[in-house]
Image: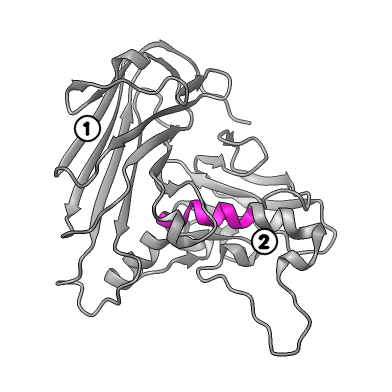
Amino acid sequence: HFLLHESIFRNHNAIRQKPQDPAEWASVANATKKANLFRYKYLPYLFSLHFIASLSGGTVIRPVFYEYPTDPKTHDLGYEFLWGGSMLIAPVLYEGAKSVQAYLPKDDWYSVFDHKYGQLIQPGDQTFPAPWTSLIPVLVRGGSILPRQVPNVTTEYTRKNPFELLVAPGAKHRTNSAAEGELYWDDGDSIVEHFETYNFYHWKFSYSATAKTGSLKITMDRAAKSLPIPTLDTVEIFNYEYQPDFKSFQLNGKKVDIDLQSSSYNKETKILTFSKKNFIDMSSQAQILVDWTNSVSFSVNYI
């Protein structure tokens, strides 16, 4: 599963050598499928990291000390790494291991793997369960918005599925939780000759919530020409401390009927999901605002 979180994922073999793809071993096939679907789900985020690195320089996969240079415990932390600045991966490195020792720098971290999904995890030294049937420990940094899509069997088909956003707010400021992120998108095939003339989209996302209201703003920083894109249909928000009024949702100031069958709020896990088929056409205008009101406030808990 470690290689599934490399920037480029492929299997190497040679002619007349024994097959070694994951389907050859039933014992790991299901776990590998689960891990590969996770990778495909977050390809929009990974693609955006590659795009930013090509456009402006920087790193896609980076050591933890890149983000936390003043924390001496990260300086020799060779057994975990980051996707960009928002996703921390703590892989299983030893055969037969049933758990993983990880260090989380002082920050807000949310689990996005099988163990306590969507919950705030206390920073510092942690031990995570890592059965071979599970995803390896992956956590998202508070203050982040990650674009994603429901995975399909190929990247081509995955690209046609609706967009989703995972919102992981910073939990430090109880009166106003916030997060931001971005998405770059092109046709998936063209080679970039010159960024100035290249055809691509760039959106910026910003989220904020108070005890009374919540909002998600989408700003189109660059528009592409004649490039069809999927709609943004689903938003999942961690650590949402308020009971939302699903009848209060508005899109650009106009009431919108959220799909109540696919939308939910769990006051125990504090995970809010709202969804609607063909919800938001992000190419339709320069700024898009989704906002709503709340009725009840809950306190935050670390796991």
The image shows residue 9 at horizontal and vertical percentages of 56, 70
Question: Picture coordinates of residue 230 (x, y %)?
Answer: 32, 48
Say whether residue 22 is left or right of residue 198. right
Q: Which amino acid does label 2 sit on?
A: His
Of the pair 173 and 113, the residue shown nearer to us: 113
Residue stretch in magenta: 35-44
**Most common SS among magenta residues:** helix
**Of pointers 1 and 2, the one earlier in the residue sequence:** 2
**Magenta-colored stretch includes residue 135:** no
In the visual, does 245 lie left or right of 95? left
Residue 197's spot in the image, x, y percent?
15, 72
Name the amino acid type tagged 1. Answer: Leu
Quarter-of-image position of residue 190: bottom left
Disc number for residue 274: none
Q: Which image quadrant: the N terminus? A: bottom right
| Of the pair 125 and 222, the residue shown nearer to us | 222
Q: In this view, does 280 lie above or below 126?
A: above
Residue 38 lies in the magenta-colored region: yes
Mark 2 sits on what residue? 1
Which numbered dot is residue 289? 1
Residue at image position (30%, 64%) is: 187
At mark 2, the secondary structure is: loop
Q: How far apart are marks 1 and 2 (CA)?
A: 38 Å
Residue at the spot x=73%, y=64% of the render?
A: 23
The reply to whether residue 144 is visible in this rendering is no
Q: Where is residue 239 in the image (x, y as percent from the top left)?
A: 48, 28
